[in-house]
Image (spheres, rainbow, N blue to C red):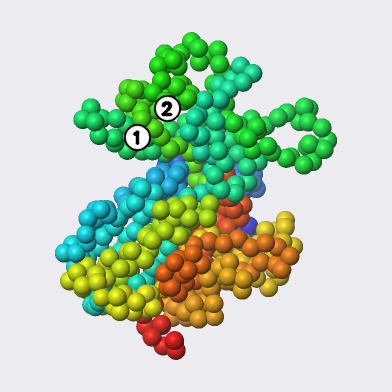
Amino acid sequence: DGYLAGVPVTTSSMRTLLPRGNRQNLLRLRLLERRRYNHLNDGHTSSFVTMVQPPRNIRSLFNIALTLRAASSLASPPGTMPPLSKMTVEQMGLAKSAMSYFDSSPDPFHAVQSSVDMLESAGFEELDDFSPLNGRLTPGGKYYFTRNKSTLVAFAVGEKFKAGNGFKVIGGHTDSPNLKVKPRSKRGGSGYTQIAVECYGGGLWHTWFDRDLGISGRVLVRCDSGMIEQKLIKIDQAVLRIPNLAIHLQTADERAAFKINKEDHLSPILSMAAKKALTTNVDDDDGDGWSEYQEPLLLRLISDQLSIPIEKIADFELSLFDTQRASLGGIHSEFIHSARLDNLASCYIAIKSIIDHVQEGELAEDEDISLVALFDHEEVGSSSAVGAGSPIMKEAVRRISTALNAGDGNEDLFASALQKSFVLSVDQAHAIHPNYASKHEKGHSPKINAGMVIKRNNNQRYATNAITGFLIREIARKAGLPPVQEFVVRNDCGCGSTIGPIISTATGIRAIDLGCPQLSMHSIRETMGVADLSNGLALFRAFFKHFSHVNSNVQQ
């Protein structure tokens, strides 16, 4: 008994599939594996070992099969081998879709665009954030608006909504720690052309060394009409790299400490300076107060990518990202390895949950507003015009309530709506690390693929209290979902925070902080469980469906 290509098998089943000495069956297995590989090879499969020649006996075949890791997001077609995973077809399908979302969202601008693409495919209508909402909204309608192209608000109006009713809110954030190109990008030395970058948020910066880095963000483009147009750019090539210093050039103390000077050691290399002199035609002397301070090769790269003249580039906001795509991991394909899981995983299942809520006909009996808000700048404190500390959340409740009350901005009804509302502040949680288990509080050590995690801190670093925690546990119980896990930091360890307390402070809306458990938070590449995407989606859908009923049974 054991595993064949990651699938549990028994001795009897192996004999059935592969009778000893039956060369024909061995060839059939090879064909099926190849057929499966061709079916699944869409860029998200793990490494695959091809059997060049059929093995001579079952044992050698078994040993080779243990190395096959063509982990996929779909089950095999009828008539082929069983799935190479213990995950269900539904879970793997969701994982595949999420991984595509992660790959297409290297920065907040692209994360919002990826979310908008999902919403528009589901029939959500875009609203002009600069125009009044009065007369635009109707019960049963579904809408979204963006701000700064890096923050998104999407909502669906219950068909039985009445003025003063509450908002069921799922809030997350679109940003992640990364390296951003400085306003004056030109930098170099020792014969290299480099790019000047600034650390954004609290990244594990040593993980950015020796990675294949691309560039993404938004570019301001001068149009012939005189208008300034915003264009998204994603250069999905290894155009930049931050090389490590060779071990032979470090002292023993330097090797042990691995201390990084964020200003001196994190500037990525773009090219050799000699090559630049031969290839660039940009005249550094023809400046406009901005372009002369930019690296000419970077401007050329942007120009080529967007198919515009260099002189049309007015400004940009650019970030670096790891070009390695999201992948499945573990012998049972139970893990997802990807950049920016904190907090794109929450963003993806939040957007999918509100789409599912609409498409499953739940609005027909819904008396509330179901809303998803994805904010920028959480990793740097949320204090900005488009962060969770901005007026966006409170404005949304006020404007939507007023528009659905025939333009009557009744302050009493608005206050009532705030008190009836609830926010799921969803941000990734810390799963217990097997190599650093002592860093976790013994009674509050969440596990990957074991359910969503409620985060608590009595010093108000998280917004959870007894009532808000109970409401979510009860919703999970009512929906037949796995019990939620709990996370509390050790008394001798600092505690992070997120948007829950910020939104509650700004609006007075009750909130809870929770998220999917993950490892390597703030690394350039993080790890979470495949099943936890499904766990999170199921809980978010249950929240939209059951919150009002569960909340009505709790004494306020």
- Where residue 305 sits, quadrant-wise, is top left
Q: Secondary structure at mark 1?
A: strand
Q: Residue at x 32, y 38 (%)?
A: 230
Q: In front: 178, or 88? A: 178
Instruction: Answer left or right for 299 relative to 450.
Output: left
Q: Residue at x 54, y 77 (%)?
A: 465
Give neighbour class at mark 1: few <14, some 14-19, many 20+ (Cα, 10 Å): some
The answer to whether marks 2 and 1 mark residues whose Cβ atoms lie closer than 8 Å is no
Question: Vertically, is 384 above or below 49?
Answer: below
Instruction: Answer left or right for 344 relative to 306.
Output: right
Mark in front: 2 vs 1: 2
Return the x and y of residue 435 as percentages of the image width and height: 72, 56
Q: Which residue is denoted by mark 1 in the rendering? A: 220
Q: Residue at x 33, y 37 (%)?
A: 231
Return the x and y of residue 235 as percentages of the image width and height: 43, 33
- Where residue 123 sits, quadrant-wise, is bottom left
Instruction: Answer left or right for 117 relative to 446.
Output: left
Instruction: Name the N-terminal-most of marks 2 and 1.
Output: 1
Q: In front: 397, or 27? A: 397
Return the x and y of residue 540 as percentages of the image width and height: 42, 68
